[in-house]
Image (cartoon, grey):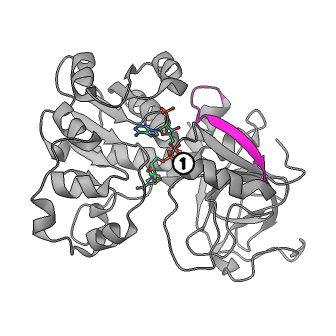
Amino acid sequence: MPCPTNHRRPCERSASTSTANLPTSCDSSARPCRVGPRAAFAWPRGLFPGQLPRGVGLDVAGIVDAIGQGVGGLAIGDRVVGSADFAGCTSAGASEFASLDHWARVPANLDLVQAAALPMAVETAYRHLDLLRVTAGQSVLVHGAGSAVGFAAVQIALLRGARVIATAGETYAERLRAKGALVTSYGEGMAERIQKLAAGPVDLALDTAPVPADPELVHRLIRGSVKRSEQDTAPTSGPLADLVRAAGGDPRRVVTLGDVKSATRLGARTSFDLLRGGVESPRTRSDVLGEFVLRAADGTFTVPIARTFALEDWRAALDVSQSGRARGKLVLLPSGAAA
Ligand SMILES: NC(=O)c1ccc[n+]([C@@H]2O[C@H](COP(=O)([O-])OP(=O)(O)OC[C@H]3O[C@@H](n4cnc5c(N)ncnc54)[C@H](OP(=O)(O)O)[C@@H]3O)[C@@H](O)[C@H]2O)c1
């Protein structure tokens, strides 16, 4: 399958297009293309805190209205999806114009709202399944598969030929079953329910359930300054302890996206400990976006959308997102947004 995803090519804004409303504090020389007001912005949960002012919103789909110098294969008016640099720019995805640092083309048979749901969920799920080294024939648990990342991870693990067991609430349990996963509810007793469904311990487990961020611990983890004593009191209960039990008691078979505190104490792996120098570091997988855009267009892959909001209602969207109960992607639509 062709993979029309592009990456961080140097650019400048096209002289032939309007520069009104462009973000000014962000170095446009590192932003290959820009999409205009007819765009859709999907809201990812769990943004990392950082210096203010900064933009919010990572995933963007829209119509190109400016192209950087030296960027080939793209024309004004093309439909693209990609990600904006919310960590480095004062204006990111949730704005009328967004500069993308990588993108993939959106075919005519995929609407921009559906496309906007894809980048973060696909990249995060793919990267963490790489980290777990998921291959055909393994049994893989995805905990929190009702989340955007979890829903994507189930589909990608199935595509890799894994046998997938998922925990999810009622929102998407049936859709996950229809895709081929064995599904049970999360919460008390899940370790036993999972082992029953899997007919024994699972080979690998991925925790995609949303948890409140703990940026201070994440920073210490990356710096390698988590004290030994913090790792000596492994919890015997809680979701991550359940996942370790479901994986036969081996914490190294478990990776969590967010529950860094429990992982630190249990010896499970996280997205962040791998950022430390000298430790295996998974590369980002934005290169696979194009493949999954095509799969979404032909109806074989999806990241569910909970609802759309007008761009000016971004605070209401943020509140829903932060509640941990989004039940799908939340997509912001600037006025005049096109599908
Ligand atoms: N480390 C990284 O690189 C990285 C990157 C992106 C995201 N993340 C993290 O990944 C996690 C998922 O992000 P997301 O945007 O995909 O989340 P999300 O879509 O906002 O997840 C919300 C859904 O999670 C389910 N859920 C809520 N509480 C749960 C619980 N206690 N146990 C299991 N499922 C629960 C609910 O679905 P039901 O209907 O099934 O109850 C809810 O609708 C977040 O913690 C985020 O911060 C990490």
Instruction: Please say whether residue 129 is visible from this viewpoint.
Output: yes
In front of the other: 287 or 95:
95
Q: Position of residue 335 (x, y in %)?
A: 88, 53
**In this rendering, would 84 be left or right of 313?**
left
Q: Is residue 208 left or right of residue 89?
A: left
Quadrant containing the C terminus is: top right
Q: Which residue is labeled 1 in the image?
A: 323
Q: Residue 304 magenta-drawn?
A: yes
Task: Determine crowd level at label 1: few under 14, some 14-19, many 20+ residues with C-alpha closer than 10 A.
Answer: few
Residue located 22% across and 29% down the image:
202
What segment is highlighted magenta in the picture?
Answer: 298-311
Q: On screen, 31 above or below 151?
A: below
Q: Of 64 and 306, which appears nearest the observer?
A: 306
Residue drawn 76% across and 47% down? 309
Three-letter code for the amino acid on which mark 1 is drawn: Ser
Could you say which quadrant of the image residue 150 lies in? top left
Q: Is residue 254 magenta?
A: no
Q: Position of residue 280 (x, y in %)?
A: 24, 61
Q: Is residue 26 above or below residue 278?
A: below
Task: Identify which residue is drawn at 62% across, 33% down.
Answer: 296
**Left or right of 183, for residue 91:** right
Instruction: Measuring from the top left, give residue 46's x and y in whole percent.
Output: 50, 56
Numbered circles on residues, count: 1
Determine the secondary structure under disc 1: loop
**Residue 133 visible in the current orientation:** no
Q: Nearer the viewer, residue 288 or 270?
A: 270
Indicate the quadrant containing the N terminus: top left, top right, bottom left or bottom right. top right
Q: Is mark 1 within 8 Å of ligand 1?
A: no
